[in-house]
Amino acid sequence: MQEAYGPPEVLRLGDRPDPHAPRGWTVVELRAAALNWHDVLVRQGRYGSPLPHTPGADGAGIDLATGEEVVVLPSLSWGRDESAPGAGWEILGDHRPGTYAERVAVPVECVAPKPVGLTWAEAAALPLVGLTTYRALFSRGRLRAGESLLVLGAGGGVASSAVTLGAAVGARVVVTSSADAKIAQATALGALGGVRYDGAAADSWPEAARELVGGGFDVVLDSVGSWPESIRALRPGGRLVVLGANRSDQALLDVRPFYFGQYDLLGTTMGSPADFAGLLRLMAEHDVPPPVVDRSFPLDRAADAHAHLESGAGFGKVVLEI
């Protein structure tokens, strides 16, 4: 839990009352919780979470009402419109106590059976990243077998998930990175290859990426905010799917080339319960590897886990074992 906003060190073990499950909710006894960059922003106070606060969106454990092994869907109160979340939508761990705990209360619609064959750590690493990636690639990006996909920033949870899901449905996947080792790891997950975006390639990486697929990409997944460069990597009529602003929160586009290029610009977030059901169906029907777990920490070392996540040195998800 945290009693102040700030650096990783504000995360400390503490005691809070057991969660209460009102009508339509249930309590999950957690076995693991996974970190997301979103948790860092919560810890820093970007979302105005009430203090003291228990962060954490991702988790897996035992549904105490049924005894079943479940994963927690952190997308609360999406609403009835699948095109966008409703006014009451929130992410678990923002303003309600989250998963860095022994137990957490969530709506009944936000638990799903733990996929067969996944460890607790892998199951905890699945929901937010898997759901976000599924919605970005398929519900919004309309990615199909045989199409080409460029994933910006290999190494993070969304990037590794995009490689595995894209490759599983038969897309040709390319990644970008500032490290050859991360490109090699993405290739091992199913990517065709990757390009460096730093150093001498800083101004030419979109063209280098295009060469790997013999032309522009059908879909570019941009979680960093590099819209002008991403559009350069697209084929005419391609789709740019935006789900983050890790590097820049503003983008300047040339309007005429954009509309003459017939491009789609698609914003997306974490998805709905229907998207999550789609993700679980895709995993059951295709040969999708488990989520990549970079490193696990015990719950009492949550501060160390955050420091490791912020270092950018890992590949895949960071997990807390409970």
Image: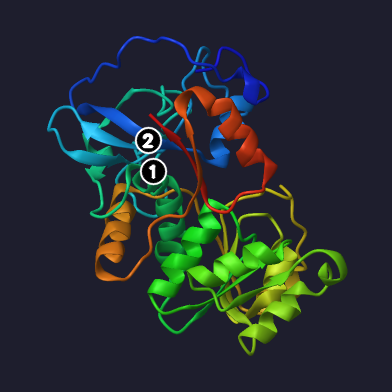
Q: Quadrant location of residue 9?
A: top right
Q: What's under tag 2, amino acid-wise?
A: Ala
Image mark for residue 32: 2
Q: Position of residue 116 (x, y in %)?
A: 23, 54
Q: Position of residue 20 (x, y in %)?
A: 26, 16
The residue tagged 1 is 121
Q: If you read the primary sequence from the N terminus, does the residue marked by circle 2 or circle 1 appear first? A: 2
Q: Is residue 46 above or below residue 116?
A: above
Is residue 113 toward the left or the right of residue 249 in the image? left
Tell me which residue sits at (25%, 47%) in the image.
114
Q: Name the foreground residue: 276 vs 182.
A: 182
Tell me which residue sits at (74%, 56%) in the image.
251
Label 2 environment density (alpha carbons within 10 Å; few <14, some 14–19, many ≥20):
many
Q: Is residue 143 visible?
A: no
Labels 2 and 1 touching (C-beta < 8 A): yes
Q: Position of residue 296 (x, y in %)?
A: 48, 39
Which residue sits furthest bottom? 214
Q: Name the foreground residue: 240 vs 279.
A: 279
Q: Is residue 177 above or below residue 56?
A: below
Image mark for residue 276: none
Tell me which residue sits at (42%, 58%) in the image.
135
Element type at mark 1: helix
